[in-house]
Amino acid sequence: MAILSPVAWRTPPRQYGAWETVAGNIAEGLVARGWDVTLFASGDSVTTARLHAVVERGYEEDRSIDPKVAEYLHIPEVFEHAAEFDIIHSHYDFMALAYSRLVKTPMVTTIHGFSSPRILPVYRKYRDGYFVSISDSDRLPGLNYVATVYNGIDLSLYPFQAGGGEDLIFLGRIHPDKGVHLAIEAARLSGRRLVIAGIIQDPAYFEEQIEPHLDGARIRFVGPVDVAGKNHLFAGAYALLHLNTIPERFGLVLAEANAAGVPVIAMDLGSCREVIRDQVTGFLVKNAGEAVGCLERVPQIERRACRQRVEQCFTMDTMVQQYERVYAAVLGLEAKKMA
Amino acid sequence: MAILSPVAWRTPPRQYGAWETVAGNIAEGLVARGWDVTLFASGDSVTTARLHAVVERGYEEDRSIDPKVAEYLHIPEVFEHAAEFDIIHSHYDFMALAYSRLVKTPMVTTIHGFSSPRILPVYRKYRDGYFVSISDSDRLPGLNYVATVYNGIDLSLYPFQAGGGEDLIFLGRIHPDKGVHLAIEAARLSGRRLVIAGIIQDPAYFEEQIEPHLDGARIRFVGPVDVAGKNHLFAGAYALLHLNTIPERFGLVLAEANAAGVPVIAMDLGSCREVIRDQVTGFLVKNAGEAVGCLERVPQIERRACRQRVEQCFTMDTMVQQYERVYAAVLGLEAKKMA
């Protein structure tokens, strides 16, 4: 079993890096369940699987590494060793597909999101491969999907916090897609404090639409946070605001917040309604105004119910078991092809 | 026989595009000599070989095409069809190497230049492949080179022009590497007119160091030129100035100018001394001052000798015959491996 993780960040990432997080979680989960797993990831990765690395550090963490060169060193490795594996599980977007027909080992690709319509021709060319979507909403018609498997989190990292606090929190990339400006609008309209955490992916957006509102008190920006930082934010959180402006692909942070018992107010776009159960683990809204309206109703949400929903649907165990079923199905289909 | 051309430009390119020019010339030459050739290139390419294309136009010519997506669609094609070919001849830099170990068909890579030291790890990984350098000077120690094959031009495109004229000419990318500013300096010091032609690859360099000198009379810029445009420049040329500031890899334009009978004054860096024979087909110099000194001696150069040198060393026929020897050698080595 080979897991191909991206090399933008370490696996698991120190802070940001959702694809590497999921790839790492799957590798850990499979090892725990007795699989012989090789993880193809950056050399500084931390894993109980066998680590295969030719790129020392993530190219986003070490600017001396050329991303294109890293990719052309890293991706072929798994295919050059394909004969050693029964199955390859790729988290490396369309780039790994380009190699997939050159080896006999079947490959499953988890599509963590389509970054642009421009990449779709590659997916269409390789549409007869084996694909997994991370939500029912994030699917490209015509691809050979074998399952939707929701991302699972390591529950032990996000302990339940019964109390909570009074802050609104935003967690995610600082990018217009994530609607940070709408979170600020909702905070101002409601008169509540807002703490914003995440990497600045769009500096112009940050400078123009976020920074002018920061006052160090009511609206604060704390930069990127690690797991401990997230738990600290969850401890003081009244609710997480996730007012994304484009369809969410999965929204790992929604599950993380819920795991800690934090209700989530999310835009009803993309997969949010698959992750958040309206009026049970948070609220689904259509704009910032509706989000403000829901804030008063947050105390109606049972924090225990948020945790329970994650325990049922979004744990590493659930995810890994679903992937085991995917692998079995793919190996079955391959055996049929041979026969 | 498969030839893998880049898809930055059409093959052959309309104006700029040295790699596509050479790949196209090899394909044409092999077809003329009776080979069954498939050219992997952009869909609008013009060739007597069988054209295999999945990317319609060069990504430098059609900005709606994402270069990375084009690359990941185009390069795997030749490898997915590898079993149909006895040999693959790649002009696609380090990217094609990444696929080379996944097929049984041997691949020869012509290295048209190392764009950056950052790409060398990929060449080092695949150092046991079969490599051709385009000049003895442009070699990376440790790679398995099977030959140096100089680029060859289609002599019929650049007819001999006995007369010449009084202009200095510069032909090439407008980039500091090409020393356009030094050509201007030499022109000013000598009091001769200079015509500059080429694509602007470095707009800041053009604005700061070239544009201020343009006066429409003594120093003129005419933009990129096609074959007819080059011949027009050659017809009025006293000498071509090629005062490159970094080692030249081959310098196709030096051979083209010589073919038309135009003497070349070139910086003695990289392959220039392999292409230009000092005091026979031009002059090799160490700086712009020396270039000015040589200008008086240009009439000593026999224009016929320039043509003859190209006829002997830098024709498509010579190049194609040398590549035939490379292919035979590689197939021989492969047969030995099997035995």
Image (cartoon, coloured by chain):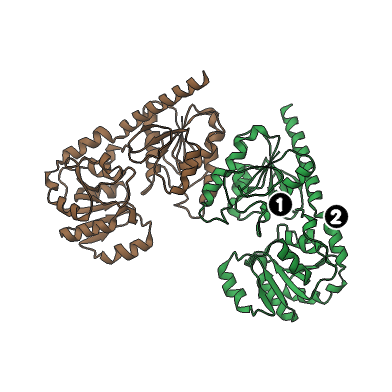
Chain colours: A green, B brown
Residue position marked by numbered label 2 in the rendering: A312
Q: Is A164 located above or below residue B305 in the figure? A: below
Taking B170 as reference, is B44 left or right?
A: right
- Relative image position of residue A141 (x, y in whole percent): 69, 49
Residue B208 lies in what quarter of the image? bottom left
Tag of residue A259: none
- Relative image position of residue A269 (x, y in whole percent): 73, 63
> Circle 2 sits in a helix, a strand or a loop, which is it?
helix
Residue A292 lies in what quarter of the image? bottom right
Does residue B42 appear anywhere in the picture? no
- Relative image position of residue B176 (x, y in whole percent): 33, 56
Instruction: Identify the residue at image location x=73%, y=57%.
Output: A250
Residue position marked by numbered label 1 in the rendering: A22
Chain containing mark 2: A
Q: What amino acid does circle 1 point to? A: Val
Q: What amino acid does circle 2 point to? A: Gln
The front one of A282 and A225 is A225
Chain containing mark 1: A
Instruction: Identify the residue at image location x=84%, y=56%.
Output: A311
Taking A117 as reference, is B163 left or right?
A: left
Does residue B119 appear anywhere in the picture? yes
